[in-house]
Amino acid sequence: MKRRNFLGLGLVTLATIPAALSATDFRKEKPDTWTAKSVDDSIKKLYGDIKPEEKGIKLKTPEVANNGGQIPVGIKSDISAKTVAVFQDVNPESTVAVFEVPEGQPVDFGIKIKMKKSGSVIVVLEGTDGKFYTAKKSLQVALGGCEG
């Protein structure tokens, strides 16, 4: 394939990608969520005054994290979701991440988070049914916290 044809195809592909990908920038849409100091306040700033049910989410973390700078967190659910938000209760800002879930896609995330000391990880899932669901798991962080 000639270079010009290849570059032309690349530009056509790049032009179609933004139409297929659209994600909410939660930092712009809900900026107070990212500066909230407590989990309850963060959830309220993101979703409003909600009462999530404690069911339907499998949250996996180590019981003891050797490195507070790289704590693996697994999130799975069979609930059809619009968004999934991750919070923690020990760092100065409680919100860790907010994911928009494409319609029909399963909730199966694996991320690494930082925590200064022992505490809890909290997940809130916004269902396509308009309900909210939550899971919480406590863990110990070995001495050193984020310093590892």
Image: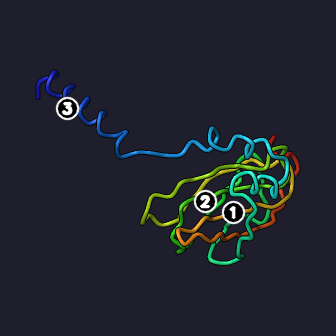
What's under tag 3, amino acid-wise? Leu
Label 3 close to label 2 by CB (< 8 Å):
no
Q: Is residue 24 above or below residue 81?
A: above
**Is 127 left or right of 148, judged from the image as shown?**
left
**Is 101 left or right of 90, judged from the image as shown?**
left
Q: Which residue is mark 3?
A: 9
Q: Is residue 122 above or below residue 38?
A: below
Residue drawn at x 81%, y 66% as measured from the top left: 138
Label 1 close to label 2 by CB (< 8 Å):
yes
Residue 93 appears in which quarter of the rendering? top right
Relative image position of residue 67 (x, y in whole percent): 76, 49
**N-term-proximal mark, 1 vs 2:** 2
Residue 26 appears in which quarter of the rendering? top right
What's under tag 2, amino acid-wise? Val
Q: Which residue is mark 2?
A: 84
Give residue 123's mark: 1
- Mark 2 nearby-residue class (10 Å; few <14, some 14–19, many ≥20): many
**Is 60 left or right of 138, judged from the image as shown?**
left
